[in-house]
Image (cartoon, rainbow, N blue to C red):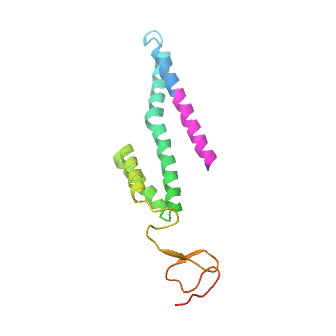
Amino acid sequence: MKNSIKLSILLAVALLITALSTLASAADYPWNFTSDPAGSMAAFMGIGLAICAIIIIIPLIISILVAIWLYKDAEKRGKEGIIWVVLLIIASIFLSFLGLLIVVVVWFVIRPPIGGVAGKVERKCPNCGRAIPEDARSCPYCSKKFEE
């Protein structure tokens, strides 16, 4: 998965460089629609591509990468990652980039520690040393029975 993220970032940078170079070359172009209409329209299309890349494609790639990270982080912390991704998509549809930021900030505020829910008390088995629930009468791993 790390290679696909690197490839996405590389693609976004290449697209941004192409868009900016198109804008730079269009700035030097003589905008004379009467003598060279085809060239002028090509420059116009280049500017349209540059604007499309800057305004639509790059934020879309950023949103996809944030959604992937949010899903993995939620799953790693014992929460339903798909719910957070759906919430991110809905907030991004209605509030655009601000919605994405709001969901990420809310996730940073309420996310539990890695491995489960905050405040969940667990004890260790005296025989094997693994974490077991506080109310367990025997270890689910080594079957050691506990005194009551």
In this rendering, position of residue 121 left or right of residue 1: left
> In terms of depth relative to the viewer, which is nearer, 40 or 59?
59
The stretch drawn in magenta includes residue 24: no
Q: Identify the residue at image location x=44%, y=30%.
A: 51
As displayed, is residue 147 above or below residue 55?
Answer: below
Residue farthest top in this picture? 35
In this rendering, position of residue 6 left or right of residue 95: right
Q: How many marks?
A: 0
Q: Identify the residue at image location x=51%, y=52%.
A: 69
As displayed, is residue 87 above or below residue 128?
Answer: above
Residue farthest left in this picture? 95
Residue 74 seen in the current view = yes
Task: Give the percent coordinates (x, y) of residue 108.
Answer: 42, 54
Q: Identify the residue at image location x=38%, y=55%.
A: 106
Task: Give the percent coordinates (x, y) of residue 34.
Answer: 43, 10
Residue farthest bottom in this picture? 148
Residue 38 seen in the current view = no
Q: What span is in magenta? A: 2-18
Task: Give the percent coordinates (x, y) of residue 79.
Answer: 47, 64
As displayed, is residue 42 above or below residue 68?
Answer: above
> Would you say the magenta stretch is mainly helix, strand or loop?
helix
As displayed, is residue 113 above or below residue 62?
Answer: below
In this rendering, position of residue 76 left or right of residue 129: left
In this rendering, position of residue 146 left or right of residue 43: right
